[in-house]
Amino acid sequence: MASSPDVPSAGNTPDIPGSDTPGSDTPPEARNAAGATAGDRRGRVRARRAAVMAVPATLVAAGLAVLTAQGALGVQFAISGMPFTVTATELNGTGFEQFGSLDNMADGSPNAGDTGGQVLVVTSAIKHATLTKLCQSVDLGGTNLLITAGGGAEKVSATDLTTDSTELSGDAAFDNIEIGNDASTLTKAGVKGPIGVFSQQADTVRIAHLRQTNYATTAGVFKLPGLKLRFSDSGC
């Protein structure tokens, strides 16, 4: 029987001259750069997780957002990673809570960029809410998907309404607000956040000229009188 040529086995790969690792032809500087990139990415993810602990502390003076009731860190579905705008001339609600969290995109999402597929958001919860002249829009690149409702006599209404937001503004007023709670002890909206996370809650909330940049919204019941959905050159 003819003998086969000598082929190095997987466990006996010859050393490459000048290589730090036997069996590797990758220059040390390339391996170091790859390691640094991975380390930077892990560092950014850790920084986002740490920031969750204090996000809502900055929101009181800015006019707090008002939508969420999810009962855990972020929503329970993978977000698209595409932000959308929500506006209303007025929002009124009872049972308000708010804390920081992280939303996650689907694995391999083209919208992840250098975020690691995570978005740091403010999770807000409101048990019962009404909104006047609601507008929601998402930029699809060249056009906007626009939704409007509640522009007539009947307002938009929702129970267990939730949003995860990165930006918000408006003129806000609260009754019996508590600031600095541990998120795991919240009671006003029936939502309990993770232990050790900064949060706040109030009996009632009113926000005039509400404007939010959101990544997710959920609701137990969401009634949209006068709903109109269309494409538009401009958003809300």
Image (cartoon, rainbow, N blue to C red):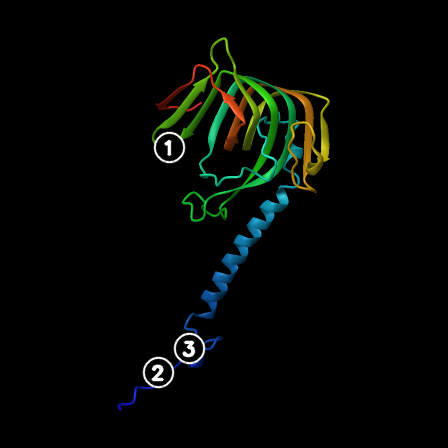
**Which marked residue is nearer to the observer: mark 1 or mark 2?**
2
- Measure how far apart labels 1 and 2 are at the Cα level: 55 Å
Q: Position of residue 13 (x, y in %)?
A: 42, 79
Q: Position of residue 160 (x, y in %)?
A: 58, 27
Dot 3 crowding, Cα within 10 Å, few <14, some 14–19, many 20+? few
> Is disc 1 placed on a helix, strand or loop?
loop
Q: In the rendering, which numbered label is found on residue 140?
A: 1
Q: Are marks 2 and 3 in contact (CB under 8 Å)?
A: no
The answer to which quarter of the image holds residue 193 is top right
Q: In this picture, is 43 found above or below 123? A: below
Mark with earlier residue (1, 2):
2
Q: Which residue: 44% across, 36% down?
A: 82
x, y percentage for residue 43? 57, 53
Given the image, on which type of amino acid does mark 1 rest? Leu
The disc labelled 3 sits on which kind of residue?
Ala
Comparing labels 3 and 1, the label whose residue is closer to the camera: 3
Q: Say the numbered circle drawn on residue 10.
A: 3
Choose between 155 and 91: the one closer to the eye: 155
For disc 2, the marked residue is 7
Q: From the viewer's perspective, is residue 236 above or below residue 102?
A: above
Q: Is residue 231 above or below residue 113?
A: above
Residue 163 occupies quadrant: top right
Q: Taking 2 as reference, is 187 left or right?
A: right
Mark 2 crowdedness (10 Å alpha carbons): few <14, some 14-19, many ≥20: few
Give the residue drawn at x 35%, y 28%. 143
C-beta proximity under 8 Å, tags 1 and 2: no
Q: Amino acid at mark 2?
A: Val
